[in-house]
Image (spheres, rainbow, N blue to C red):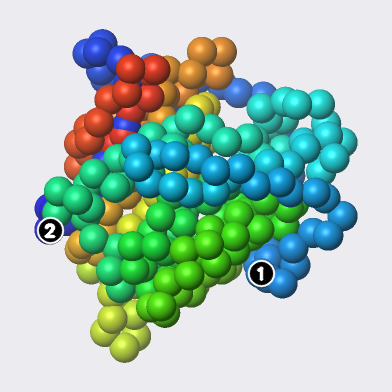
């Protein structure tokens, strides 16, 4: 692994990435103010919503995925997302499955270790990548989603059932859950900074601040989402050995985001280096970022 924090990206398509920066000037309609950021306790599992559990096999790795009704939780039809209200956390996105597979390969090849690491999953939904980090020996895994309802009805039950199913004799990672918008959630995250990453920053006790590994899948679907996500990552990432794994499609038709634009933004900013880890035939890609 590189000695500087980095981005690892997952994308699927054989097209040569287009590094045009015109997307940064695109306008999007303003959204209503987001709900306040809160920490959701693991004891706050919703008893009013039924969560069924199904097995999912990821190239030999057996995990469990929960299923809940969007209509039952939010009173919405089975919609992928409603910007500013519901950000798609109840849907199991293919990118999160691809991300788990890629992380497993990275671990097997010796390019990544979760042992004793502080891990943050952004836009977690089912939380499968974060669950994988728990099973691989992470010291702490923090899960973030826009909606507190997603955490109460899906993420927390899914984390609990997967970790109890494995019945590991070793100590289980510290798991915490945070709901809120990417523009504000850093104020609650235990290992985040108030401002964007200072390459020389450390805590008052001389310890490095930030998360060692940040995971996120299908979160770069729009231009505004990319900007907000990247700003949050720079407030949360550990220096000098932090790494970010991002899974997404090369282009999200109709909303303007994708790994091409995200890579362009990274290149323009010049703070982090990015490398393509894997490409998947369905149009998804996995990217690794480092400072």
- For image coordinates 34% across by 68% down, the residue present is 137
Which residue carries the number 1 mark?
42
Q: Position of residue 25 (x, y in %)?
A: 46, 22
Label whose residue precedes the other's in the sequence (2 or 1): 2
Judged by depth in the image, the label closer to the viewer, 2 or 1, is 1
Mark 1 residue element = loop
Q: Position of residue 15 (x, y in %)?
A: 26, 11
Tell me: residue 11, above or below residue 236.
Answer: above
Tell me: residue 239, above or below residue 277.
Answer: below
- For image coordinates 48% across by 18% down, the residue present is 252
- For image coordinates 73% across by 53% down, the residue present is 153
In this image, 274 relative to 197: left or right? Answer: left
**Residue 173 seen in the current view:** no
Near-viewer residue (232 or 87): 87
Q: Residues within 10 Å of mark 2 (few under 14, many from 20)?
A: few
Q: Position of residue 159 (x, y in %)?
A: 56, 59
Mark 2 residue element = loop
Label disc, if present, on residue 176 of the rendered structure: none
In this image, 193 relative to 269: left or right? Answer: right
In this image, 145 relative to 100: left or right? Answer: right
Which residue carries the number 2 mark?
3
Q: Position of residue 33 (x, y in %)?
A: 74, 44
In this image, 70 relative to 94: left or right? Answer: right
**Residue 8 seen in the current view:** yes
Cα distance between the residues tagged 2 and 1 = 35 Å
- For image coordinates 85% across by 40% down, the residue present is 72
């Amino acid at each position: 692994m590189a000695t500087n924090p980095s981005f690892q990206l997952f994308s699927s398509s054989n097209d040569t990435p287009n590094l045009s920066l015109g997307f940064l000037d695109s306008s999007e309609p303003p959204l209503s103010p987001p709900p306040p950021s809160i920490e959701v306790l693991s004891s706050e599992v919703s008893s009013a919503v039924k969560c069924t559990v199904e097995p999912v096999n990821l190239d030999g790795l057996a995990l469990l995925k929960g299923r809940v009704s969007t209509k039952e939780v939010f009173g919405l039809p089975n919609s992928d997302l409603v910007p500013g209200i519901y950000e798609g956390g109840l849907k199991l996105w293919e990118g999160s499955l691809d991300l788990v597979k890629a992380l497993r390969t990275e671990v097997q090849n010796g390019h990544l270790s979760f042992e004793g690491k502080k891990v943050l999953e952004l836009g977690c939904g089912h939380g499968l990548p974060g669950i994988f980090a728990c099973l691989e020996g992470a010291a702490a895994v923090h899960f973030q989603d826009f909606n507190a309802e997603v955490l109460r009805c899906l993420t927390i039950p899914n984390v609990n059932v997967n970790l109890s199913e494995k019945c590991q004799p070793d100590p289980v990672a510290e798991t915490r859950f945070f709901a809120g918008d990417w523009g504000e959630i850093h104020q609650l995250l235990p290992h985040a900074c108030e401002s964007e990453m200072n390459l020389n920053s450390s805590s008052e006790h001389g310890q490095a601040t930030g998360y060692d590994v940040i995971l996120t899948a299908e979160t770069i679907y729009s231009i505004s989402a990319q900007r907000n996500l990247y700003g949050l990552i720079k407030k949360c990432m550990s220096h000098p050995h932090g790494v970010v794994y991002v899974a997404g499609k090369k282009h999200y038709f109709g909303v303007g985001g994708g790994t091409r634009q995200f890579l362009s933004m990274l290149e323009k900013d010049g703070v982090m280096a990015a490398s393509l880890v894997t490409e998947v035939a369905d149009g998804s890609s996995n990217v690794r970022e480092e400072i």
